[in-house]
Amino acid sequence: MSSTVTFRYIKQNPDIHTYIKNADAAVAAQGYTEHSFAHVEKVASTVEMILSTLKYPERDVELGQIAAYLHDIGNVINRVDHAQSGAVMAFRLLDNLNMPAEEICAIISAIGNHDEHTAQPLNAITAALIIGDKTDVRRSRVRNVDTVDLNDIHDRVNYAVTTSSISFTDDKKALLLELELDTEISSVMEYFEIFMERMLLCKRSAEVLGVKFRMRVNNTEVM
């Protein structure tokens, strides 16, 4: 059974917009960094880059993009277990759009396994979503750049990242996360204090994709 549910349609769906906006408002109230459209679009772009480069079928790439766009909607219910609640929400949305069960399974498995506390890179779509999500570290995720709270380690580390990119090495054998970190604001050690678990999860996810995960900070290889 083919599906007419496209990534373009999902991005334009007003109900999904409402869930994303309210989910971001919920985490903002708890002091978390930006989880709105800039984040989900960045994650979807990374997923598309990974799966397309590795020559996965076009529909698998699109399902990965849809999963990326929907992956944080569970925050509207609660930050705790938001991956699982988001997967259930996505199921209802996609089932109501008559998406085939196999495609729904691919999307909700990825969403339900993207949080580092319960994540499992079960397959290529899930692995690509995990990498896209966990490598989105950037200054613009800090909500109030003009009044950033440098006493908050999450704001401090994100604010310190002046540039960030994820791409394949020339031989396509590794994904390379490159960061420029202002060490007068935050140290490399502080970055790993809050992101080590996520970077190790990226490494496991890359292995599922048949590649390595490498990381370079201020032109120095650290993973």
Image (cartoon, rainbow, N blue to C red):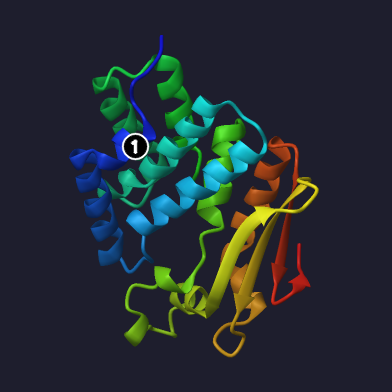
Using the image, determine if residue 140 lies above or below residue 63: below
Instruction: Give the residue drawn at x 45%, y 36%.
Output: 112
- Amino acid identity at mark 1: Arg
For the point 61% across and 30% down, the residue is: 123
Q: Is residue 214 left or right of residue 192?
A: right
Kindly state the secondary structure of the residue where label 1 is placed.
Answer: helix
Q: Residue 12, percent across and down?
A: 26, 41
Looking at the rendered image, the quarter that the C terminus falls into is bottom right
- Measured from the top left, where is residue 47 in percent x and y? 53, 43
Q: Is residue 175 left or right of residue 128?
A: right
Work out whether residue 124 or residue 189 is closer to the camera in this orientation and state it.
124
Residue 72 can be seen in this image: yes
Compared to residue 79, the image places residue 9 above or below, namely: above
Query: Label 1 belongs to which residue?
Result: 8
Q: Residue at x 44, y 85 (%)?
A: 150
Please tell me which residue lies in front, 151 or 161.
161
Residue 207: name its quadrant.
Answer: top right
Q: Is residue 216 left or right of residue 33?
A: right
